[in-house]
Image (cartoon, coloured by chain):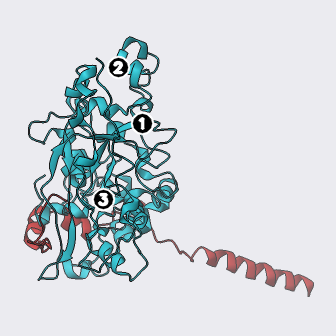
Amino acid sequence: MKRLFLLAIGFLFLITFAASGCIDDVVSPSPGVEVISACVTCHTDKEVLQELAVEEEEEESEATTGEG
Amino acid sequence: MPPLEAWEKVYIDGEDFLEDTHNKMGCVVCHSGDNTAEDMESAHIGLIADPSEDNCNTCHREIFEKNETSLHTTLSGFISALEARGGNLEEGSPLATAFENHCQQCHLSCGQCHVSRPDEAGGGFLSGHEFKSTPNMKNNCVACHGSRVGDEFLGENEGVPKDVHRKKGMQCSSCHGQELHGSGELAESRYHTTTAVSCTDAGCHDDLYDTADSNPQHEQHLEDLACQVCHAVDYKHCYSCHVSIDEQGIPCRTSEPSVMDFKIGLNPLKSAERPYDYVVLRHVPTCPDECVYYGENLLPDFDAQPTWKYATPHNIQLNTPQNASCDSCHGNAELFLTEEDLRPGEVEANQGVIVPEIPNPSY
């Protein structure tokens, strides 16, 4: 009986140990796999940026005088 | 400094940034947004354009913590000056509203020195999102500090030569470095920081005191005159700044045209580091009703601070009109700030800095 109990405990321990390898709370690319970022794809493409970039409206008052 | 077009501000050119440590983390780690989206609008949902405040500290903790109390971050110099004149900057007060509208834009984040031009100067990458450990003189420092210090240093004031240090190829960063990150304690002004640079403590002119006996003017005056008294030339003075909101609801300001002049006065900031009796003074554009748009008498103790302030013009010359001889300065009333130079309404404020008696000629 005691032997069966110890076997069960050992088996449970084995299952727990094996399962922990499946828990992964840090996502990282696998070695050798290149992560393509849409950010870099656009922001390194001059033509795309020229087409899409929007000039922000300047909020400088015409009433301002002097050098500041 | 020519403005950047919209696309230039966000264009990553070259390989340098792509190989940089900062890029290895991935854009969205700092900027949020969605790096898998297929269109700009979707990609930019939740985007943080300037992520300095919540990200730089992850790796640069020590600098970040010091920088939290720096003048560039806190604008404590502005705040001190207003509070010294009795200004109430409690949240929601009229002066606090004025400050938010007209002063807050000078607040800098890490990125606005090390990645981009300052927002106040239009923003945009310095060099394709590269992280620059040393800010760029023209695109960072002078972009904001242009109309006085920048123009002085670069010789942009008509008839006034550039600073000799600039002639030698030096830049802002040649003298100004880590002290810009602050000391970890709030400072009343750039002259009150414990890390401020000085001429004799920058590794260049440290031997002035040891060699004073070889220069009679140094021998006589190293202790009682600031270096600029003998070695600066005409610099800008500003007058009568008033802030308001225009008809379109845009914050605006007006001030009189600046004036080029050179004035020696009494030292308002005497300390162990600045023991001088005489220093050069610059008129600052504050006036009692500068914020009258927001309310009357918002600076009730206006006279508590002079309007002629301790100055360190960045237009240093070896030979100047006032150091040509002893009598070029002594007896030359034009050089000294006296009551006749004060505008009505500023007489009381400047009693502590005007020269009561012009130093006598040597004869």
Q: Is residue B71 left or right of residue B171?
A: right
Q: Which chain is red?
A: A
- The mark lying in front, picked from 3 and 2, is 2
Badge 1 or badge 3: first in the primary sequence: 3
Which residue is tagged 2?
Answer: B217
Could you tell me if residue B127 is visible in this image? no
The residue at the point 80 percent across, 82 percent down is: A9
Amino acid type, residue under disc 2 in the picture: Gln
Which residue is tagged 1?
Answer: B277
Instruction: Work out whether residue B121 or residue B131 is closer to the camera in this orientation and state it.
Output: B121
Which residue is tagged 3?
Answer: B112
Q: Which chain is cyan?
A: B
Amino acid type, residue under disc 1 in the picture: Asp
SS of the residue at dot 3?
helix
Q: 10 Å neighbourhood of mark 2: few (<14), some, or many (≥20)?
A: some
Q: 10 Å neighbourhood of mark 3: few (<14), some, or many (≥20)?
A: many
Give the alpha-carbon distance from disc 1 to disc 2, as whole Å: 15 Å
Badge 3 or badge 2: first in the primary sequence: 3
The residue at the point 24 percent across, 64 percent down is: B119
